[in-house]
Image (cartoon, grey):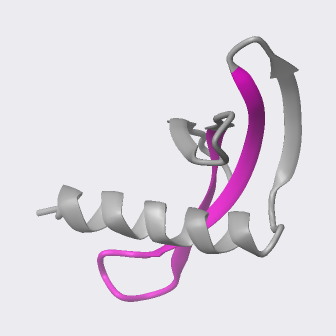
Amino acid sequence: MLDTGWLQAEIERQARERYISGQYELGKLNMFGLRINIRVTIPKKDGFGDVSFVTGWMVKPNGQIKLNMPYGGK
């Protein structure tokens, strides 16, 4: 059973760390804010290896980030 609370917290934790350290890719700027992409890595449920995927965020005028969507891929 997947612990969705843990998964959400882990994605947010990694995104916050990478955002603060500048480890993200810039996207488009529009009237809603600046889009950025941040790669996160989650350990596989069976304990063997990790899954890495890109998450899409919006940077708000106050500097906070809000998750728009996780993307698939390696």
Q: Quadrant of residue 2?
A: bottom left
**View extreme (front): residue:** 62
- Quadrant where the C terminus sits is bottom right
Provide residue 38's location: percent of width, then percent of height: 70, 55
**Where 5 falls versus 34 (above or below)?**
below
Provide residue 52's location: percent of width, then percent of height: 61, 65
Provide residue 40's location: percent of width, then percent of height: 60, 65
Judge whether residue 50 is colored magenta.
Answer: yes
Q: Quadrant of residue 16?
A: bottom right
| Front one among 44 and 26 | 26
Judge whether residue 59 is colored magenta.
Answer: no
Q: Main secondary structure of the magenta part?
A: strand
**At 25% across and 68% down in the image, what residue appears?**
6
**At 60% across and 43% down in the image, what residue appears?**
72
Left or right of residue 30, residue 8 in this image: left
**View extreme (left): residue:** 1
**At 81% across and 58% down in the image, what residue appears?**
24
Q: Start and end of the magenta stretch?
A: 33-57
Provide residue 15's location: percent of width, then percent of height: 59, 63
| Front one among 16 and 62 | 62
Left or right of residue 10, residue 62 in this image: right
Q: Quadrant of residue 43?
A: bottom left
- Quadrant where the N terminus sits is bottom left
**At 30% across and 81% down in the image, what residue appears?**
46
Left or right of residue 39, residue 40 in this image: left
